[in-house]
């Protein structure tokens, strides 16, 4: 058996073990890089670490550090509250607000599971209270997260654009972002229609959505979120109807209280104002001045931490360390594959099919199937380098192929086996959880079967890039 084939089989074993044993894929990839690099490729430690993505490490740590501070001081709660108030009593707009909110959060740097974890409990609570399909609401949250997930300053966008630059492929950050945005927007529109979204327009006010409010008497909604931490006060019955999310915890509890008078918005405190300005500054620094997103984010986070240490003390612990480990481990192993020539060997094998378009659609389906059960980011980190050799032949546009791979590998995150799908499943109150699980599984299967072919036709066949 050739060394190249051994390294590919080891990569497959890493994916299988990570999926079935709930072990961080990055940790497995580091171990695999050590074993394969030492025993098969005859590499020393320097050769193994040559593929460590130091720039992406800084991006991941910096952006998630800044966003952890935003969560800690309540800035994300303020954003959620302000977005909900925009619906002005129109039930049908709630799913779209959730779509836009998660998209905005990931676009400015939140990790996709973090954005879903913030919004999903609120979104699914609204779905239960106002008769909205939980599948509709869950899909809107997840697809919203992916719609913004490839902005130039986002985690996914930074990762993919970094890989493209490292592999010296033609890249287009805006095209990648728009491809994911449009694809998820179209899917969200289809889900909205199929899952009864059009019928929600008949519910012309939030007060009528619950079905038990007296006619002719508006019932406003208290969207104030409970404080995080162990000192969260206990709720008591004061004559209002309170519907807490199931299994309350400091990080997921959302209380929706129906009262007879409107409640004020969450206040814009100095830390929240400073954090909002920091998020805007990050966007401007990266897009207008072409500064490094990771270093800029860390600098802004340090400034906020110095000004309000109490709000930021726990933020370092909330950095997405599992994601950091995942990305760095997988890309380090990919670096070992590159050092030993496996990427060139595999790419030549795929290109050897003789039909580049067929090889392209096969890679898209591989990305979708694996990502439905494992890490979307991990599979992108592995597949894009594998596509480099036949992309270098010039018969397929690199920009379109990278965008198709990225969309195929992330749009399937609504699967209940993925992190985002599991968060949606766990956040849904008052549902038959087994039935909801089957719905998510069937929907995820439909997405896996249909989307790679569609994005292949739309992005690869025309030869974009």
Image (cartoon, grey):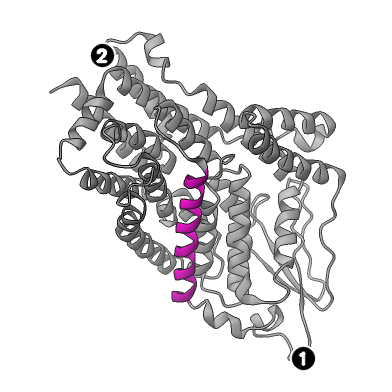
Q: Is residue 220 above or below residue 156?
A: below
The local crowd at label 1, few if under 14, some if 14 to 19, many if 20 or more residues have their Cα within 10 Å, is: few
| Residue 462 in sight here | yes
| Residue for badge 2 | 39
Q: Position of residue 374 (x, y in %)?
A: 38, 44
Q: Is residue 8 above or below residue 109?
A: above
Instruction: Decide which of tag 1 and tag 2 comes sooner along the chain.
Output: 2
Q: Is residue 405 above or below residue 198?
A: above
| Residue for badge 1 | 216
The residue drawn where x is 62% and y is 28% is 292
Residues rendered magenta in the picture: 174-195
Q: Quadrant of the N terminus?
A: top left
The residue drawn where x is 36% and y is 25% is 333
Residue 203 figure quarter: bottom right
Residue 282 figure quarter: top right
> SS for tag 2?
helix
Q: Position of residue 16 (x, y in %)?
A: 30, 39
The residue drawn where x is 42% and y is 15% is 49
């Amino acid at each position: 058996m050739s060394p190249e084939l051994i390294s590919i089989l080891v990569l497959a074993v890493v994916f299988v073990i990570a999926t079935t044993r709930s072990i961080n894929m990055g940790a497995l990839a580091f171990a695999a890089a050590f074993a394969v690099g030492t025993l098969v490729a005859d590499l020393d430690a320097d050769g193994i670490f040559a593929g460590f993505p130091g720039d992406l490490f800084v991006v991941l740590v910096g952006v998630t550090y800044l966003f952890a501070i935003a969560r800690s001081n309540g800035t994300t709660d303020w954003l959620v509250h302000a977005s909900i108030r925009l619906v002005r009593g129109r039930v049908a707009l709630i799913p779209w607000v959730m779509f836009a909110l998660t998209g905005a959060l990931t676009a400015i740097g939140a990790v996709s599971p973090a954005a879903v974890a913030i919004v999903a409990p609120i979104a699914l609570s609204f779905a239960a209270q106002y008769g909205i399909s939980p599948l509709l609401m869950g899909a809107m949250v997840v697809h919203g997260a992916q719609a913004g997930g490839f902005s130039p300053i986002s985690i996914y966008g930074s990762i993919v654009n970094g890989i493209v630059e490292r592999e010296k492929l033609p890249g287009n950050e805006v095209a990648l972002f728009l491809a994911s945005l449009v694809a998820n927007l179209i899917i969200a529109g289809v889900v909205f229609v199929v899952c009864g979204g059009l019928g929600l327009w008949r519910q012309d006010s939030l007060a009528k959505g619950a079905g038990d409010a007296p006619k002719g008497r508006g019932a406003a909604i208290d969207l104030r979120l409970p404080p995080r931490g162990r000192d969260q006060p206990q709720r008591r019955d004061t004559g209002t109807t309170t519907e807490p999310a199931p299994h309350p915890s400091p990080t997921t509890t959302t209380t929706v209280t129906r009262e007879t008078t409107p409640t004020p918005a969450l206040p814009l405190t100095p830390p929240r104002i400073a954090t909002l300005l920091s998020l805007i500054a990050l966007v401007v620094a990266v897009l207008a001045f072409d500064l490094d997103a990771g270093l800029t984010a860390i600098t802004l986070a340090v400034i906020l931490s110095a000004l309000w240490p109490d709000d930021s003390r726990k933020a370092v612990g909330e950095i997405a360390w599992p994601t950091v480990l995942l990305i760095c481990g997988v890309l380090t192993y990919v670096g070992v594959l590159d050092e030993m020539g496996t990427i060139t060997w595999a790419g030549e094998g795929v290109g050897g099919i003789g039909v580049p378009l067929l090889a392209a659609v096969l890679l898209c389906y591989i990305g979708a199937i694996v990502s439905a059960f494992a890490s979307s980011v991990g599979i992108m980190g592995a597949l894009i380098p594998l596509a480099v050799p036949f992309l270098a032949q010039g018969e397929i546009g690199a920009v379109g192929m990278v965008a198709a791979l990225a969309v195929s590998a992330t749009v399937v995150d609504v699967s209940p086996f993925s992190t985002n799908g599991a968060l949606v499943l766990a956040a849904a109150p008052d549902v038959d959880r087994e039935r909801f699980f089957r719905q998510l599984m069937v929907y995820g299967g439909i997405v896996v079967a249909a989307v790679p072919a569609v994005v292949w036709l739309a992005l690869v066949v025309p030869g974009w890039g």
